[in-house]
Image (cartoon, grey):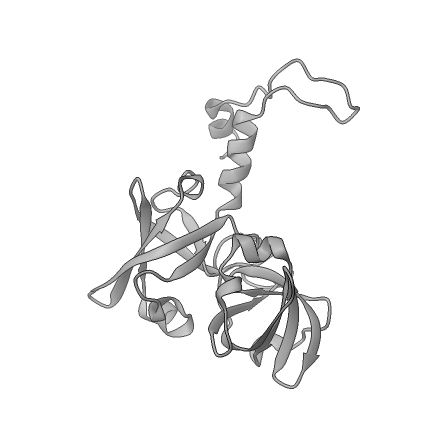
């Protein structure tokens, strides 16, 4: 579990590619504090397991599915990446619930300054956009951000100076690919609302729907 509050910008030291997988070696300092082999670190929003550690670096395996579903396959030596350790139980929840499981990729369309902030517009697939709502949360390359505008083909966020300085987002250019993760609560609500007859825990066919309606969700605080 992550919060989308980036702790450090690291750099890729090497990418060892296999037939369908890869091993990343990532240069880092802060996220190694208190970390050990087997711990989770989000790299550009992708939850990866630390497989080895050395002075100022760690390695992580990237399986084929992750390479297909994220931008990690495009990383090369020297690429800058956003890093976050898994949330500690006694830590502050500064962003929103981020699982580190990417829902899809988006394409940067534009970056436009406005006052002290920068508007970043992202083009995304319909399957991702269905869960993006104005003033809701989205993780872009692991960064927890508030959605400021939604269109039929994409969405926009307004990035404050601190976020720009502490992450890689404002170093992007039009055409660059970013990892997107939707708010997990929206995905669960959608699943419950559209769940139809299926197998019960006992393996028997259920004959009734869930009974969950928008009124039910409203009455119960959703």
Instruction: Give the vertical position of 130 relative to 5 (above or below).
Output: above
Horizontal relation, residue 147 to residue 66: left or right? left
What residue is drawn where x is 36% and y is 55%? 107
Q: Between residues 61 and 8, which one lies in front from this camera angle?
A: 61
Q: Report the residue that reaches farthest toward the left.
A: 115
Q: Say which residue appears at 38% left-offset and 66% top-offset.
A: 169
Q: Is residue 183 above or below residue 58?
A: above
Query: In terms of depth relative to the viewer, which is nearer, 113 or 180?
Result: 180
Residue drawn at x 48%, y 46% as measured from the top left: 183
Image coordinates for residue 162, horizontal then vertical, percent: 36, 71
Q: Residue furthest right?
A: 202
The answer to whether 213 appears left or right of 54 in the picture is left
Q: Which part of the image, by quadrant, shows the N terminus? A: bottom right
Residue 50, x across and y down, in percent? 68, 69
Say which residue appears at 34% left-offset and 44% top-offset.
134
Q: How many marks?
A: 0
| Outermost residue toward the front in this view | 19
Q: Is residue 69 above or below residue 32?
A: above
Residue 44 in sight from this viewpoint: no
Please tell me in which quadrant of the rendered image residue 159 appears: bottom left
Q: Residue furthest bottom?
A: 55
The answer to whether residue 136 is left or right of residue 198 is left
> Is residue 198 toward the left or the right of residue 95 in the image?
right
Q: Nearer the viewer, residue 196 or 116?
A: 196
Q: Is residue 117 visible?
A: yes
Judging depth in this view, the residue of 141 and 135 nearest the camera is 141
The answer to which image quadrant residue 174 occupies is: bottom left
Residue 2 on image: x %, y %: 57, 59
**Percent of width and height locating residue 77:** 51, 77
């Amino acid at each position: 579990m992550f919060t989308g509050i980036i702790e450090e910008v690291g750099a890729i030291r090497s990418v060892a590619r296999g037939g369908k997988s890869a091993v990343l070696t990532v240069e880092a300092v802060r996220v190694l504090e208190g970390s050990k082999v087997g711990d989770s670190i989000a790299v550009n929003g992708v939850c990866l397991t630390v497989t080895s550690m050395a002075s100022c670096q760690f390695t992580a395996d990237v399986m084929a599915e992750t390479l297909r579903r994220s931008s990690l396959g495009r990383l090369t030596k020297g690429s800058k990446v956003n890093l976050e350790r898994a949330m500690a139980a006694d830590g502050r929840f500064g962003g929103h619930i981020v699982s580190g499981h990417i829902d899809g990729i988006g394409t940067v369309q534009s970056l436009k300054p406005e006052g002290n902030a920068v508007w970043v517009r992202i083009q995304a697939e319909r399957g991702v956009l269905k869960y993006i709502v104005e003033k809701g949360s989205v993780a872009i390359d692991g960064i927890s951000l508030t959605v400021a505008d939604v269109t039929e083909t994409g969405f926009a966020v307004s990035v404050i100076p601190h976020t720009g300085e502490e992450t890689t987002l404002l170093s992007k250019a039009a055409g660059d690919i970013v990892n997107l993760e939707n708010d997990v609560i929206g995905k669960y609500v959608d699943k419950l609302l559209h769940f139809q007859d299926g197998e019960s825990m006992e393996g028997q066919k259920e004959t009734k729907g869930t009974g969950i309606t928008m009124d039910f969700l409203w009455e119960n605080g959703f």
